[in-house]
Amino acid sequence: MDHFLYRDGQLMAEDVAIADIAAQVGTPFYVYSSATLLRHFKLFDDALAGMDHLVCFAMKSLSNQAVLKLLGDAGAGMDVVSGGEYRRARAAGIPGDRIVFSGIGKTREEMHTALTGGIRQFNVESEPEMQALSAVATELGVDAPITVRVNPDVDAKTHAKISTGKKEDKFGIPISRAREVYAMAASLPGIKVIGIDVHIGSQLTDLEPFRLAYRKVAELTEQLRADGHEITRLDLGGGLGIPYARSNEAPPLPSEYGAMVQEEVGHLGCEIEIEPGRLISGNAGMLVTGVIYVKSGEDRKFLILDAAMNDLIRPAMYEAHHDIIPVVEPAPGAEQTEYDIVGPVCESGDTFAKGRMLPTVAADDLIAFRSAGAYGAVMASEYNSRPLIPEVLVHGDQFAVIRARPTFDEMINRDTIPEWL
Ligand code: LLP
């Protein structure tokens, strides 16, 4: 459930009309609903209520500081994957002891930043990375709390580009070698083993792959304890999917996921951490865009929008589906037209949807892409010298621009022309 509904013929974000934001901010823009973000965070928090736990928002899905502060104030931790994300989380007021550092290629500089600024744990993904962390921590005279990310060789049954838990994927340490890697970790100075980490992929619409992976983690916990390691925390990753096509998708609910977690690992008495991104932010955001032209091709109609692949890359990159709806509510039984919905970028890949039925729209009408809160703004670029689009946060009947549209000069002036030219 989200808070983007029609009221009196107008699409609303909570109690604000999308058309009013568009009039003030101009299109295209991203809009997020605070109530939806908080609701989704709470669903996970409640789902794990029976266990000592921390929900760490995977901020790679949506990293605006206003969103981080909103979730942080509600008690969320953050899952970060770069020095930039770490700094952003800290700047938004997230305490270091609620920040988990994931990612397969943490540099020594990033380790240094996190160890000096405060960190809950590093999820280590390889032996060389563990050695580097040991060196950096020893030099600073501190212990780095770690889990090892294990690769359980489970098929997440999701899009190939977002599956991470098969043995051919670049992530984690093969679970079959975990015991030797933990033995090495225990022998290294500056490393303090506290738990195990696993993350098998994103947009999972079935609980079974999670269950298989968590069962393997539970077995490993017992083996490692028998080997003498103190395993007190399990980071179970993120990845629970959302319904992108509302009409025919119903992925498992956080409550069902939480019950499964309890069944598989509850008996171990570990503190549970999870790293959901998309389920918190995905349906909490929309991309709002204007129709520039309706163009009639030989055998089809093109809806040419002022948003493009540089603003929302998911359809071009993953063949992703986003529901697209008009901002003015169509009358019941309104005429429908089949459109190819495209942006103005000079690539055929700049196509959001082909042959999509929509209530007939005209130039200057506003339309909205649903489920665009996750991996939308964060994956945007300035391709074709199109400035990054604004982000707006709604709270009840108020809204605020939380990232302004840069001016053309701001964008252009980042380049420097060397003196010798
Ligand atoms: N933890 C780790 C270690 C991850 O790599 C990811 C996502 C998450 C948590 C959060 O997963 P989520 O709950 O959001 O599914 N750009 C792609 C998705 C890439 C996901 C990468 N890792 C997309 O637009 O579908």
Image (cartoon, grey):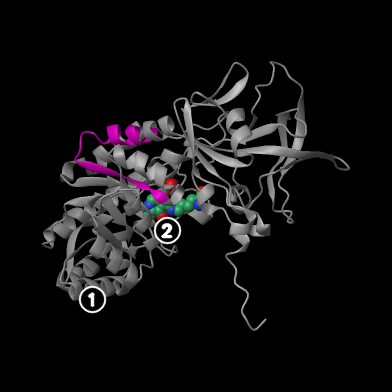
Query: Which residue is at a point 35% across and 48% down the rendered structure image?
Result: 92
Pick the residue in front: 408 or 300. 408
Pick the residue in front: 31 or 266. 31
- Answer with left or right where residue 219 lies relative to residue 397: left
Q: Nearer the viewer, mark 1 or mark 2?
A: 1
- Answer with left or right where residue 48 lies relative to residue 201: left
- Does 244 appear in magenta? no
Compared with 38, 76 (above or below) is below
Compared with 300, 121 (above or below) is below
- Answer with left or right where residue 298 lies relative to residue 99: right
Visible residue check, residue 323: no
Measured from the top left, where is residue 362 in percent x and y? Answer: 77, 31
What is the total number of numbered labels drawn onto the structure image? 2
Measured from the top left, where is residue 366 in percent x and y? Answer: 67, 32
CA separation in Å, label 1 and label 2: 30 Å
Question: Judging from the image, what secondary structure is the residue with disc 1 in?
Answer: helix
Report which quarter residue 27 is drawn in. top right
Measured from the top left, where is residue 197 in percent x and y? Answer: 29, 55
Visible residue check, residue 415: yes
Pick the residue in front: 113 or 343. 113
Q: Look at the image and give the residue range highlighted in magenta.
A: 40-59
Q: Residue flagged by tag 1: what amino acid is it?
A: Ala
The disc, 1 or 2, on the residue closer to the chain's N-terminal end is 1
Measured from the top left, where is residue 242 in percent x and y? Answer: 47, 37
Residue 166 image label: 2
For disc 1, the marked residue is: 135
Query: Which residue is at a point 16% across and 66% down the rendered structure image?
Result: 143
